[in-house]
Image: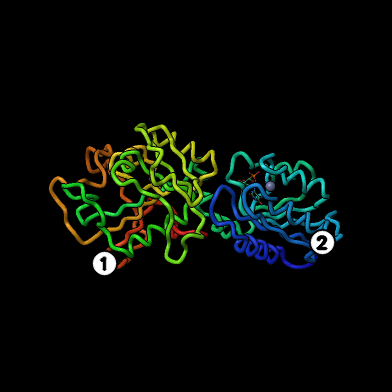
């Protein structure tokens, strides 16, 4: 192809995606640059979130609005163009209809519902090159990619416990085991995920709000969906149902698989699990915890105090998963340890981007 190196255009597309403001939720951050027949820049676009135009459609629309023509152009896009009719029409078809001659994309689409765009473009005679700066493209949407590949939301289990792994003293008192700084970080975690999930047991014991109240961010922070699962009755006056936005849900099941499927279906890609031992143990037994954020407070409760988990199906030492430590830091007078499944890429700890 004449003109500039298309990887430069891909860098621009990656920057558009990175600055798009899409960093969590149902859809990925995607950027697209259109190059003319001589390789010159002619238009660009990016995706702004669920229900809005895909990056390719946005770039085509901006070109047409400016009076340009996409015929014979090259589309450089961070994600493989979609082949599905979702909330918007398939981009592969739109690119073909626009007369695009060549498509260069970064990450192959891990979403089985939308994948297949590259083949569809090739079948229509478009020259297609995939995998350009693919690692950078996937890094933009790490949680989304992980979730799409697994077909369920990524689950981060948050624990705030004593040094001996207890979450309440023998008399049930539990507020507060960890200090203010650690609790602040929990609010930040909540603001980074799509849903906060707890069980009806915790609801009865603590009546939590499950909202994100990060320092300086309240009340403008976009709230996670607040979800309670279990078979016990959920009082209509429960605190998690309260404003700011009323985005709460009750899942009448004790089955982690069912709960995650229901959340996936409503666009949740990342769940923060904040719950008591019974629900945590159910998730661990089902091997549905991907990351652990553990705040350890420097106190010992011992004896009959409530433990973080009960039976997780480990009968002998070799049955137990060994978590991989990703980060260790002091938070006030507590210690925060972030773990993930062994094998998750470094940086796979809970962070956005
Ligand atoms: C996006 N933005 O720019 C591209 C996407 O629900 P829909 O119809 O918006 O479809 C979302 C899927 O489309 C998404 O999971 C991904 O597989 C594919 N491509 N999605 O949100 C975009 N190009
Ligand atoms: Zn699309």
Q: Please state, as top left, top right, bottom left or bottom right, where the N terminus lies in the image.
A: bottom right
Check disc 2 and report its element: helix, strand or loop: loop
Question: Between residues 128 and 288, which one lies in front from this camera angle?
Answer: 288
Residue 154 in sight = no
Q: Nearer the viewer, residue 85 or 112?
A: 85
Q: Quadrant of residue 137?
A: bottom right
Q: CA distance from mark 2 to mark 1?
A: 58 Å
Seen at 54% across and 38% down, the residue is 265
Q: Report the number of numbered marks.
A: 2
Q: Which residue is mark 1?
A: 333
**Which residue occupies the foreground of this view, 206 or 15?**
206
> Sequence order check: which comes first, mark 2 or mark 1?
2
Q: Residue furthest toward the left?
A: 303
User: Which of label 2 and label 1 is nearer to you?
Assistant: 1
**Res 198 seen here:** yes
Check the image and report above or below for 40 versus 198: below
Question: What residue do we see at 33% from left, 51% from top?
Answer: 323
The residue located at (32%, 66%) in the rendering is 331
| 62 horizontally vs 181: left or right | right
Residue 270 placement, left or right of 186: right
In the rendered image, residue 214, in percent from the top left (x then y), is placed at: 43, 62
Please give the name of the residue rendered at 64% of the width and 42% of the height, measured from the top-left corner: 115
Q: Which residue is mark 2?
A: 36
Give x and y (percent) for residue 337. Answer: 32, 59
Label 2–label 1 contact, CB within 8 A: no
């Amino acid at each position: 192809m004449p003109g500039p190196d298309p990887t430069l255009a891909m860098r621009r597309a990656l920057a558009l995606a990175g600055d798009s403001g899409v960093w969590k939720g149902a859809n990925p951050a995607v950027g697209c640059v259109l190059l003319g027949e001589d390789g010159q820049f002619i238009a660009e676009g990016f995706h702004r979130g669920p229900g809005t135009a895909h990056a390719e459609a946005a770039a085509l629309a901006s070109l047409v609005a400016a009076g340009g023509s996409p015929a014979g152009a090259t589309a450089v896009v961070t994600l493989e163009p979609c082949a599905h009719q979702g909330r918007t029409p398939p981009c592969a078809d739109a690119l073909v209809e626009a007369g695009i001659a060549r498509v260069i994309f970064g990450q192959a689409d891990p979403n089985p519902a939308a994948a297949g765009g590259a083949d569809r473009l090739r079948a229509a005679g478009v020259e297609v090159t995939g995998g350009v700066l693919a690692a950078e493209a996937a890094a933009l949407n790490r949680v989304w990619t992980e979730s799409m590949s697994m077909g369920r939301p990524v689950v981060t289990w948050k624990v705030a416990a004593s040094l001996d792994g207890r979450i309440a003293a023998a008399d049930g008192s539990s507020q507060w085991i960890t200090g203010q700084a650690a609790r602040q970080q929990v609010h930040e975690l909540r603001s980074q995920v799509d849903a906060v999930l707890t069980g009806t047991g915790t609801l009865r014991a603590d009546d939590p709000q499950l909202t994100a109240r990060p320092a300086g961010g309240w009340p403008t922070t976009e709230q996670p969906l607040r979800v309670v699962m279990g078979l016990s009755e959920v009082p209509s006056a429960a605190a998690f149902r309260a404003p700011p936005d009323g985005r709460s849900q009750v899942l009448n099941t004790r089955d982690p698989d069912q709960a995650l499927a229901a959340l996936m279906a409503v666009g949740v890609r990342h769940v923060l699990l904040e719950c008591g031992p019974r629900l945590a143990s159910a998730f661990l037994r089902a091997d549905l915890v991907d990351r652990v954020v553990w705040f350890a407070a420097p106190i010992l409760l011992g004896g009959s105090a409530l433990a973080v988990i009960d039976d997780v199906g480990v009968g002998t030492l070799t049955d137990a998963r060994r978590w991989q430590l990703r980060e260790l830091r002091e938070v006030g007078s507590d210690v925060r340890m972030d773990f993930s499944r062994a094998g998750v890429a470094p940086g796979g700890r809970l962070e956005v981007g």
